[in-house]
Amino acid sequence: MAYFREGMSPLILVILAAGGVILILALLVPKLWLVGAFTLVLGLLFAFNSKLWRHHLPLSMSIWVVVIGMVFGVDFFFNNVLQAHQRKRIEVLINPSADPLGVGWNVTQSKIAIGSGGFAGKGFLQGTQTKFDFVPAQSTDFIFCTIGEEWGWLGTTLVVVLFMALLVRIVYVAERQKSVFGRTYGYCVASIIFFHFCVNIGMTIGLAPVVGIPLPFFSYGGSSLWSFTTLLFILLALDAYRKQDLERY
């Protein structure tokens, strides 16, 4: 986000996002089908735009070779590079019923807790899944399921809205900085908080692998709280001195 704001080409972001999608599809879709579909799309682009032949053929062929390597190399990486517990987490993400009593226990109980909260929740400290310790690490990595069970859809929606408001405010503060460093730092803070927010909530509802990332300002832990607070304090300090930067320029 920070590099994109300061002029990085959007094409790089598109390529990175496409690479992630291809890696995920390589685990789910038969390899030959995926390669054939990608080749067909690339061929249609060239067929309907003759300029691509003259200007982008070498680049497109290089991307095609990289994609083929990614598609057929993902199995080697998955089986020989990743450790056993990392493979299990990916398998549970793709198939939640693969190991419900083992690696998938945390996510399964977390989803049960969030679903049992209903619309308005069971009340403060009244959640059965969290109160009786069915969900491990419910005060740190899986704090969001505690909110979902005790306060329901209303509570989780409020948390999401508050985070979105915080991110919008951080971006607003970053945009009014007069120095490149101030803007870049502000967008980096927004990116860090957004990443932790998405991954933490994603892993509690089964949309992301469990990686042990805390929910900013909610998860228990002094180091996490101090880290995020320090990031915001530095941004506020930069914003307080932005008038001096304006006078300097």
Image: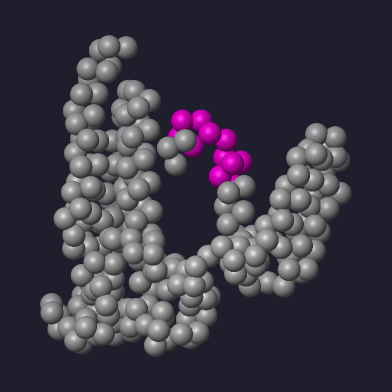
Write down the quadrant of residue 190 in the picture.
top left
In the picture as drawn, the residue positioned furthest to the top comes out as 248
- The residue located at (85%, 35%) in the rendering is 54
Percent coordinates x, y for residue 186 in the rendering: 32, 37
Q: Nearer the viewer, residue 53 or 137?
A: 137
Write down the quadrant of residue 178 in the picture.
top left
Write down the quadrant of residue 234 in the picture.
top left
Q: Is residue 8 magenta?
A: yes
- On screen, residue 208 versus residue 32, left or right, reads left
Q: Is residue 6 above or below residue 135?
A: above
Q: Is residue 122 magenta?
A: no
Q: How is the structure coloured here?
A: one colour
Percent coordinates x, y for residue 74 in the rendering: 64, 63
- The residue located at (19%, 31%) in the rendering is 237
- The quadrant of the picture occupied by the C terminus is top left
Q: Is residue 240 above or below residue 144?
A: above
Q: Is residue 193 above or below residue 158?
A: above
Q: Nearer the viewer, residue 164 or 104?
A: 104
Can see residue 193?
yes
Q: Is residue 98 above or below residue 245?
A: below
Majority secondary structure of the magenta segment?
helix
Percent coordinates x, y for residue 132 in the rendering: 19, 86
- On screen, residue 121 versus residue 34, left or right, reads left
Percent coordinates x, y for residue 180 in the rendering: 38, 25
Tag count in the figure? 0
Q: Bounds of the magenta span?
A: 4-14
- The residue located at (39%, 64%) in the rendering is 211
- The quadrant of the picture occupied by the N terminus is top left
Can see residue 121?
no
